[in-house]
Amino acid sequence: MIRKRLAIFSAIGSLVAPIAAASIDPPTGAAGGKIIFKQLCTSCHGKNAQGGGPVAESLEETPADLTAIRQNNGGVFPVERIAEFIDGREWVASHGSREMPVWGQELGQRVLSELVRESRISDAISMVVDYLKTIQRSEPDE
């Protein structure tokens, strides 16, 4: 009986171990970007990323419909420009007002090492950009 239980626990352990090990590493790419988006962006851009988040009405400008970036740029998703906009630290005042938080600054606040901070900020922004690429509309609005 004891051997049978040990065999069952061993079998369960062999199935659970890869799942537990996989959960140690945070998601990357678009999957990681989706998590970051949900944490930081949905309050303004909404769960569907179309600009209707719970605080959108309190803003002077309606948050952008992030599912139409490619559509609004002639069928091209401008990766670098979107990453720079999300980062926000290099925003030029002549481009207009900015109600959106400067995420490059916010994402790096708790990291002491400048080299590590810039790497983490870059990685997080890249993941959000990867996620935004996956939610682009395939057809133009009629």
Image: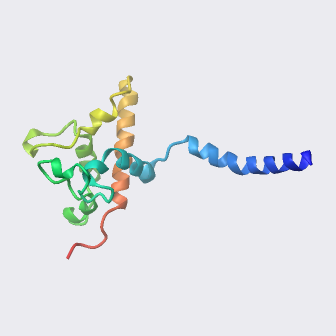
Seen in the image, is 68 located left or right of residue 3?
left
x 16%, y 54%: residue: 62
Query: Tag count in the figure?
Result: 0
x 26%, y 44%: residue: 86
Q: As drawn, which residue projects farthest toward the left?
A: 94
Residue 21, x across and y down, in percent: 63, 43
Residue sitting nearer the eye, 50 or 108: 50
Residue sitting nearer the eye, 81 or 67: 67
Note whether 118 is above or below 62 in the view shown.
above
Q: As drawn, which residue projects farthest toward the bottom?
A: 142
Note whether 34 is above or below 137 in the view shown.
above
Seen in the image, is 140 located left or right of residue 125?
left
* Color style of the picture: rainbow
Residue sitting nearer the eye, 13 or 33: 13
Which quadrant, please, contains the C terminus?
Answer: bottom left
Residue 95, x across and y down, in percent: 10, 45
x 92%, y 49%: residue: 1
Note whether 101 is above or below 55 in the view shown.
above
Residue 17, x across and y down, in percent: 69, 45
Residue 115, x across and y down, in percent: 38, 27
Q: Quadrant of residue 125?
A: top left
